[in-house]
Amino acid sequence: GPLADEILQKRQKYLGPSLFHYYKKPLNIVEGKMQYLYDETGRRYLDAIAGIVTVSCGHCHPDVLNAITEQSKLLQHATTVYLHHAIADFAEALASKMPGNLKVVYFVNSGSEANELAMLMARVYTGNLGMIGLRNAYHGGTSGTIGLTGLGTWKYPIPQGNIHHVVNPDPYRGTFGSSPGGYAKDVQDHINYGTSGKVAGFIAETIQGAGGVVELAPGYLEMVYDIVRRAGGVCIADEVQTGFGRTGSHYWGFETQDVIPDIVTMAKGIGNGLPLGAVVTTPEIASVLAQKIQFNTFGGNPVCSAGGLAVLRVLDKEKRQAHCADVGSHILARLRSLKEERYENIGDVRGRGLMIGMDLTKDFKNKTPGTELAAEVFERLRDVGVLVGKGGLHGNVIRIKPPMCITKEDADFLVDAIDHVLATAKNR
Ligand code: PMP
């Protein structure tokens, strides 16, 4: 196949300059098998970021591959104006994974589309406009969701009207520490003073992903859901990264906070790499869209539905949620002992299951973000055959979110590599 330089030249010439790539010398990936990726020289890498938390079952998992291949031979597209069994079967299987009255499914093609639809539903259902989201959040890049995204990295003149960003309940770096009260009060203050007293909805990732794997202060969602509902709003859980058992302890991230949302959005891991997203809500909320046009040409197309159904089955059959808990706690424990025993630069190790963040600092007492150190660790891990992600407002959080089939041996290889790279890092 073509070499990295050739691809890069074409990319620079024909693709937009907003596309960024990982690594100073970009990596050319030609093949993926379960938890491993291969470059054009045949070199193998342990994939610990899964195409940004998307490859859930594993690259080219045989069951998913078989499902989409068989469906592709029969019918690739028709739209929902005709009946097709795949979308119905997939919706039934997905609804069976949801608690409470969350039983009505809409299929879309991405996380942004899912959040866009959730926001529309919240506004139509409540008749209010105000949306509350968290600072440091990522909810998408479309015209509506780009306003919800509170990551502070957007440089666009976006319409910010009716969107309020409240202080994110970050136990490590947050203004109010690890107890939820102060953060919840900020939500109440925004409702009291920033809106008419009524809101359409509240949206949060149940662990902030791109923002640097920030777990919400315990008890936060319970308090805030109550405040939001009293102000007439609905509560939306963005499960785009946290869903499908990745947290290990629970199938959905919101369950870690003991709440049941009114609307749940999902994408990424739902399709193991297929362009697929979904919104699940209650019959009552869904009913307000009944007489309105709500159409999505590709949403729930036969190939993606067949693939998505196979993903759900694989995750169950291979007991991936329990596996995430098992391998994830092993990685967390080992990283925590590196923090305690060897490296003051590791300010925080956090996350659940296979959704892990290592917050690097220059000065751990003041928690000064170790942006240069993180960049160095990120690059050098690639050199030793491990691909991780990087995130957080200051780019100082190493993100470990591998395919859910990573083994304990892989996990040890990963942590040993981190240990080695930190031991020899220039920017410590
Ligand atoms: N929500 C979350 C939590 C995400 O991480 C992302 C993507 N990084 C999105 C929504 C948007 O998804 P997409 O890129 O598929 O539009």
Image: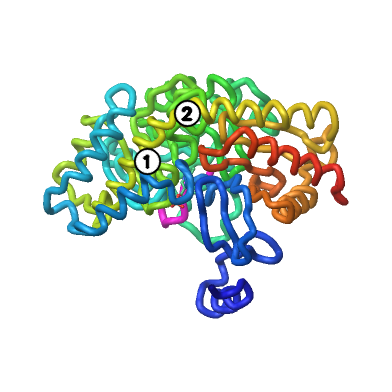
Picture disc at residue 311: 1
The local secondary structure at tag 2 comes to helix
User: Disc 2 marks which residue?
Assistant: 321
Residue 371 % position (x, y): 76, 49
Left or right of 104, for residue 147: right
| Disc 2 residue crowd, few under 14, some 14–19, many 20+, Cα 10 Å | many
Toward the viewer: 249 or 193?
249
The residue under the point 55% across, 66% down is 19
Q: Is residue 145 above or below residue 325?
A: below
Is residue 323 something one can see in this rendering? yes
Answer whether labels 2 and 1 touch (C-beta < 8 Å): no
Ligand 1 lies under 8 Å from the Cβ of mark 2: no
Residue 76 is tagged as: none
Three-letter amino acid code at the position of disc 2: Gln
- What's drawn in magenta, residue-wise? 137-144
Nearest the eye: 302 or 356: 302
Q: Is residue 62 left or right of residue 379?
A: left
Identify the amino acid type marked 1.
Val
Q: Main secondary structure of the magenta part?
A: loop
Considering the numbered disc 1 on the image, is that residue within a helix, a strand or a loop?
helix
Mark 2 → mark 1, Cα distance in angstroms: 13 Å
Q: From this viewpoint, is residue 114 visible? A: no
Query: Which residue is pictured at 41% across the width and 50% down the height?
Result: 112
Question: Which image quarter holds the C terminus?
Answer: top right
Q: Position of residue 208 (x, y in %)?
A: 56, 38
Q: Percent from the top left, x then y, of residue 287?
A: 19, 36
List x then y, in percent, for residue 89: 22, 39
Residue 313 sits in which quadrant?
top left
Q: Residue at x 31, y 36 (%)?
A: 280
Crowd class of label 1 (few under 14; some 14 to 19; many from 20; radius 10 Å): many
